[in-house]
Image (cartoon, rainbow, N blue to C red):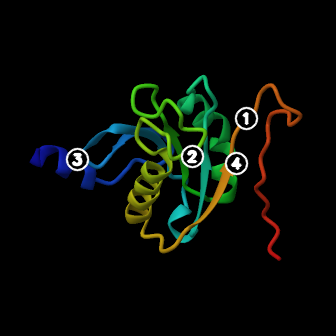
Amino acid sequence: MNNFLNLQQQPIPKQFINHRQVGCDNRMDYYLYLPPGCKSNPDFLVCIHGISRNAQQQAEYYRHIAKRLHMPLIAPLFDRLHFSGYQRLSSRQTNHRADLMLHKVINEVARLTDAHSPSLHLVGVLRRSAIRPPFCPVSTHNG
């Protein structure tokens, strides 16, 4: 177990999309991309996959936007076993709450990047809807 904790504390290589788990919790995997200069940015780009659960492809797709904006990119993977109903919040959920696990992911990345109270920019590709891919509500305009 100490080896795993030491691995978690090692610097994360930039320029690559890294596959990670939340601390010692094997229920939640996520992909992380830390572009150069992102330590000075308090904003996170979070891309949520659809029902195909293609988090890695989402991370690859939005990586160039994260790099251009110098934002850490987080792509959580809500697996079918633990997060079958990740798209909705309800009191009748039988699996784990995806929103609470996403908070764990964001807190972990905030610790890794020394970000305090990061702003989140949620993106994703929606299918079977009026919104066509890519839907990306990220703006570099301040104000």
Q: Is residue 19 visible?
A: no
Does residue 93 sit above or below 42 in this rendering? above
Which of pointers 1 and 2 lies earlier in the amino acid sequence? 2
The residue labelled by disc 1 is 125
Q: Amino acid at mark 3?
A: Leu
Q: Secondary structure at mark 4?
A: helix
Density class for disc 1 (Cα within 10 Å; few <14, some 14-19, many ≥20) is: some
Q: Residue 62: image x %, image y %?
A: 66, 41
- Residue at mark 3 to residue at mark 2: CA–CA distance: 33 Å
Q: Which residue is mark 2?
A: 89
Give above or below for 78 relative to 136: above
Q: Residue at x 79, y 37 (%)?
A: 134
The dot on residue 65 is: 4
Furthest residue in direction top, as rendered = 52
Whole-number angstrom distance, CA of label 4 to CA of label 1: 14 Å
Label 1 and label 3: CA atoms lie apart by 32 Å
Disc 3 to disc 2: CB gap under 8 Å: no
- Say which element carries label 3: helix
